[in-house]
Amino acid sequence: MCTSVEFLPWRSCEVITGGIDSKLAFWNFTKGRPYELVDFGNDSSGNAGQCHNPPHIHSIAVPEIDMLDKIGKICAVPAGGVVNVIDIDSEIAAIRSKSSSNSRKGSQSRSKDGSSTSNTDADQNGKKRLRLDFTLGGHTGPISSVAFSMFGERGKFIISGGNDKLVKVWNWSSYFHAGLSDNNDDILHLNIDVSQKVSWLCTTPADTDNLVVCDTSKTVKIMLSDRKRPKSTGVLV
């Protein structure tokens, strides 16, 4: 079942989708099938102690066209309790390179003994990915929604919300290109307890009241997301 879809603003005929099969699919919608798949269910880089089986993809965030010069052609994909920030072009290139390499290896193996020795490991060399998980202060439950910040420096932050009743504001852009180090204390910019499971969230370009959160209560929460103690107002729906 497909649970999320986003257009790629730099590729006019393409979309990406995610679903409960734990797969991120790249589509050219002039055709009837995906041209590439990223399977987060086979991701071998998971951390012990955090298990969401299978890691469903309930949300995808793609930057708007005016953000691309600063943050690149990326997408944020929450799979289970981890926000994966991936460089789309390098991810696709790595998949195609691996597929080509496996085809050559399989052809060589079959020429010798008639059997295939294709490697099914999902960890593609050369892909560029940042994992925002519980070891960095991340979610302890499945993530239901993710968005790029529209306030301040657009796209600087990624905001995620999940079943652990928390909203996380990630300073991801400082680490995606430089990589993680022994001191990643400021990668989690803000941690907000909303007291209910988060269903959906978005941001606005306003200087105040710039984070909108819908949870399992009957209230839409509107917050100021650039302070350690966010202001919250309720709007009944």
Image: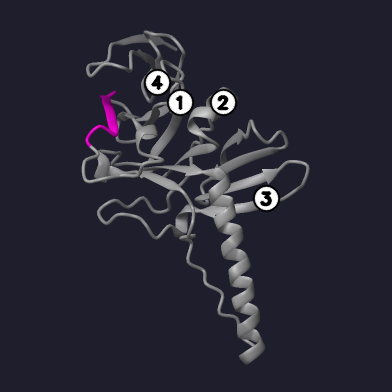
Kindly identify the amino acid type of the residue bearing the numbered disc 2: Glu
Position of residue 168 measured from the top left corner of the image (x, y, whole percent):
32, 30
Kindly identify the amino acid type of the residue bearing the numbered disc 1: Gly
Dominant secondary-structure state across the stretch colored magenta: strand
Position of residue 146 measured from the top left corner of the image (x, y, whole percent):
44, 32
**Residue at left 65%, top 80%?**
107
Q: Earlier in the sequence, mark 1 or mark 2?
A: 2
Q: Earlier in the sequence, mark 2 or mark 4?
A: 2
User: Horizontally, is 90 left or right of 235 in the view?
Assistant: right
Q: Secondary structure at mark 2?
A: loop
Q: Is residue 193 above or below residue 6?
A: above
Kindly identify the amino acid type of the residue bearing the numbered disc 4: Val
Q: Secondary structure at mark 3?
A: strand
**Residue at left 59%, top 71%?**
102
Q: Quadrant of residue 214?
A: top left
Q: Earlier in the sequence, mark 1 or mark 4?
A: 1
Q: Label 2, label 3: how many angstroms apart (C-alpha)?
A: 22 Å
Q: Label 1, label 2: how many angstroms apart (C-alpha)?
A: 9 Å
Are circles 1 and 2 on residues that touch, CB within 8 Å?
yes
Q: Label 1, label 3: how many angstroms apart (C-alpha)?
A: 27 Å
Position of residue 77 measured from the top left corner of the image (x, y, whole percent):
47, 41
Q: Label 1, label 4: how many angstroms apart (C-alpha)?
A: 18 Å
Region in magenta? 185-194
Q: Which residue is mark 1?
A: 155
Q: Secondary structure at mark 4?
A: strand
The answer to whether residue 195 is seen in the rendering is: yes
Q: Which residue is mark 3?
A: 34
Position of residue 157 measured from the top left corner of the image (x, y, whole percent):
39, 27
Q: Earlier in the sequence, mark 1 or mark 3?
A: 3
Residue 64, numbered circle? 2
